[in-house]
Amino acid sequence: MDNKKDNFKRIAEKRTNKIIESISKLHNLTNTSFYEYTNEQIEAIFDAIQKEIDNQRNVFENDMKKEKKRFEL
């Protein structure tokens, strides 16, 4: 059982750090010497990111709810 917990922790940390690093790289797009963008484009980017974060959170929350469902009298 601890092996599953260790695997989750190891992989979750690695994937989370990759995601954080990728999101941080969005900052490079603010360099107006190379890029031009609108507020609508920025909103679309962050809306898409937030939507996926919300979707993934729901997957975990629904999975946890499934475990808690148990018949009792």
Image (cartoon, rainbow, N blue to C red):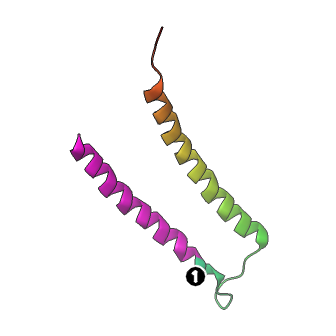
Residue 5 relative to residue 41: left or right: left
- Residue nearest the observer in this picture, 14 or 45: 14
* Up/down of 73 relative to 11, above or below: above
Residue 28 relative to residue 43: left or right: left
Residue at left offset 50%, top offset 31%:
65
Q: Which residue is mark 1?
A: 28
Tell me the quadrant of the picture where the N terminus can be found: top left
* Up/down of 19 relative to 69, above or below: below
* Magenta stretch encompasses residue 52: no
**In the figure, residue 28 lies in which quadrant?**
bottom right
Residue at left offset 66%, top offset 91%:
33
**Structural crowding at the residue carrying mark 1, measured as other residues with C-alpha within 10 Å and reported as few (<14), some (14–19) or many (≥20):** few
- Residue nearest the observer in this picture, 23 or 35: 23
Total numbered circles? 1
Residue 26: percent from left, percent from top? 58, 74
- Residue nearest the observer in this picture, 71 or 36: 71
* Magenta stretch encompasses residue 6: yes
Callout 1 amino acid: Asn
Q: Which residues are magenta?
A: 1-26
